[in-house]
Image (cartoon, rainbow, N blue to C red):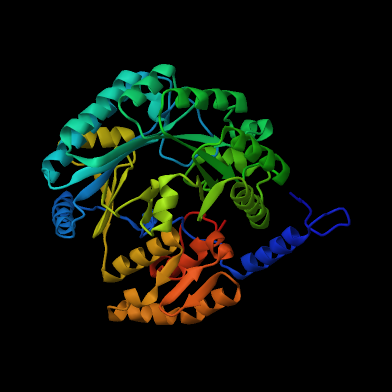
Amino acid sequence: MCFDNEPTKTCADCSGCDERRTLHQILNHLEPQAPRYTSYPPANFLQDGFSESNWHNILTNDLDLNNLRQKNKFSLYVHLPFCESLCFFCACNRVITKNKAVTVPYLSALSTQIKQYSKLINGRASLNQLHFGGGTPNYLSPEQLKNLILEIKANFKLAPEFEFSIELDPRTCTDEHLRTLSELSCSRVSLGVQDFNPKVQKAVNRIQSFELTKNFVDKVRETKIPSIGFDLIYGLPEQTRETFAETMKQVLEIKPNRVAVYGYAHVPGQAQAQKKLAILDLPENHERLDLFLDAVHFFSDHGYKYLGLDHFVLENDPLWNAYQKNTITRSFMGYNDGLDVPVIGLGASAISIFPSALVQNIKDVTLYEEAVSNGQMAINKGIILNETDLVVRSLIRDLLSMGQVKLEKYRHSLSTEILIDANLDIIKNFQKLGLIELEKAGFKLTFYGQIFARAIAKTFDYRTVANPPTVSTALI
């Protein structure tokens, strides 16, 4: 791998430098920010004061509509916000404490929410996917985690293909946690790795050595949990192309089934801990692009398939099969194999995504617990989607999941007809930049287009284009 920005006499192949210059030039032609599009509309467009009666009606009607479409399934996301220590890069909703007593009222609130939704769903839909995120889900004791999973299974009808996944912290996850998860048929564990370089780890206050991580993965594999995912972050302080290359080599030595390579999102206005990183040198956009391009080439050259955007999987992973069959979908839980089904969010700040609306639970843990104990569903924000939203959401999902858009599929209303026609010149500019290839019915992303997919998606996002995001986002 050549790390020179300019060709040199000692460089055996300068095509990589040419590619980098091309991508830097493309970056200069694009707007500097775009949402991550883990949902549409992005979460910053959710509005305060969303009523619970509205949510009851929407949930019931959307589930009935899904049944008519033979998609009578839903997914469940459970947010467990507690962590023992603070990672400076993290912008998730989390509570830092070593006092494990905080889990008791929170689990009580989750139990109440589970029963609330079980009653509302009333067997009309089957649970096909369950994901635990955080925070640190293994902050719960193995017994607490087991009871929570069993309670969910007891309150919802499970689809034949039901599976569940969980995010784990190798520094605090015990052998008993792993045995419990294996006994309950956990499908996949996801580990936050970020970067193995000691200087980077010290800068972001997350010390997690390669040896610790490798030993932990060995234990996971001994339990027969079938899939392991790693999360890496580029754009961190003290990170260089050389050090990140070493991290990727170490990841390859462990060889997880999936690797997600996320760009660090610097939002100190909403994540106070990130102010500790603001005084350090953070890579600029062109440097971030170089780091990510290295990741794309490295993992693609070493047995991984690039799904686009930020995910890589081994060829035998179900996601690769889904990608080839155009059945892959994407949400804030990442890429999924199968139907695009409603997502119900449980816990503080969790977001529910339904065909006609998005709602978010109260973010503050104490206020969330109080609301649930008072018989409320703890809904804080939400938005009802209009016809244009539905079209844009589907279009962006096609683009980010399958790398192609059939524009004619969306020309079924005046508003979306105007939206598409207004962007035809921009689409042609993307073609000139080498980001897309025009087809008779629409366009598909090129290799470069996959890297800048969110910038292309933003073209059709009439909400963000008219109202720039209030928090910092980036194209890369």
In the displayed structure, 113 sits above or below 313; it is: above
Q: Total label count?
A: 0
Which residue sits at x=43%, y=18%? 175
Which residue sits at x=54%, y=57%? 474
- Residue 377 or residue 15, whichever sits in front: 15
Answer left or right for 305 relative to 464. right
Residue 453 % position (x, y): 50, 62
Residue 246 visible, this orientation: yes
Answer left or right for 98 relative to 288. left
Residue 360 % position (x, y): 30, 48
Answer left or right for 216 relative to 128. right
Residue 266 visible, this orientation: no
In the displayed structure, 173 sits above or below 290; it is: above
Which quarter of the rendered picture does the C terminus lie within? Answer: bottom right
Residue 262 % position (x, y): 53, 47
Residue 257 % position (x, y): 49, 39
Which residue sits at x=10%, y=43%? 122
Q: Quadrant of residue 58?
A: bottom left
Q: Residue furthest right?
A: 9
